[in-house]
């Protein structure tokens, strides 16, 4: 599976900014957002801005239970730390749903950083994409 360049988003404004240029993009949640914001929030946010070329990736940190909840609602591309309980089981379920579980987040432009919006276009056209074996 190939992930286009990743952009960390923190809400709807960031998500709209990330997809605004119309380039392939991986919408990446903030680190651990699956634990504090939840998978329903993430799914709703991504559904509002989804179009061709958008891939979403929810970071669940070490929360295997929250990762399983995400899988139950169809969020099947996750970041889950390798030391999380039942990592292999979560990864296998994600794989059967056509997704994957990454042990760490890919390199990303965090839209909360000062000046990140000015660097967005260059980030999306650069070589930051990454291939991941399912």
Image (spheres, rainbow, N blue to C red):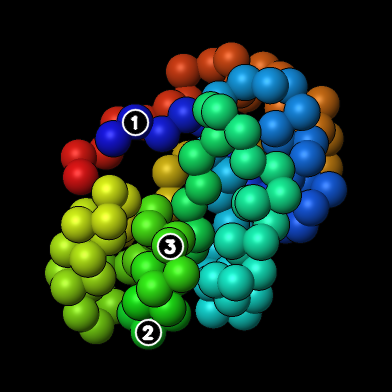
**N-term-proximal mark, 3 vs 2:** 2
Element assignment for label 2 = helix
Q: Is residue 111 visible?
A: no
99 shown above or below 6: below
The residue that disc 3 covers is 74
**N-term-proximal mark, 1 vs 3:** 1
**N-term-proximal mark, 2 vs 1:** 1
Marking on residue 65: 2
The residues tagged by marks 3 and 2 sit, at their Cα atoms, a distance apart of 14 Å
Residue 96 in percent (x, y) is at: 20, 57
45 shown above or below 34: above
Element assignment for label 1 = strand
* Cβ–Cβ under 8 Å for marks 1 and 3: no
The residues tagged by marks 1 and 3 sit, at their Cα atoms, a distance apart of 19 Å
The residues tagged by marks 2 and 1 sit, at their Cα atoms, a distance apart of 26 Å
* Cβ–Cβ under 8 Å for marks 2 and 1: no
The residue that disc 1 covers is 2
Residue shown at 21% from the left, 55% from the top: 95
55 shown above or below 13: above
Q: Is residue 27 visible?
A: yes
Quadrant of residue 50 in the image? top right
Quadrant of residue 134 in the image? top left
Residue shown at 56% from the left, 28% from the top: 52
């Amino acid at each position: 599976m190939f992930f286009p360049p990743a952009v960390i988003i923190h809400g709807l404004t960031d998500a709209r900014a990330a997809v605004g240029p119309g380039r392939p993009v991986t919408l990446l949640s903030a680190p651990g957002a699956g634990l504090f914001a939840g998978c329903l929030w993430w799914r709703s946010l991504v559904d509002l801005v989804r179009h061709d070329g958008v891939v979403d990736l929810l970071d669940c940190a070490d929360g295997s239970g929250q990762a399983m909840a995400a899988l139950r609602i169809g969020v099947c591309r996750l970041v889950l730390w390798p030391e999380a309980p039942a990592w292999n089981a979560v990864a296998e379920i994600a794989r059967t749903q056509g997704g994957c579980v990454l042990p760490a987040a890919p390199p990303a432009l965090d839209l909360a950083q000062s000046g990140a919006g000015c660097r967005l276009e260059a980030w999306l056209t650069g070589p930051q994409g990454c291939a991941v074996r399912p």
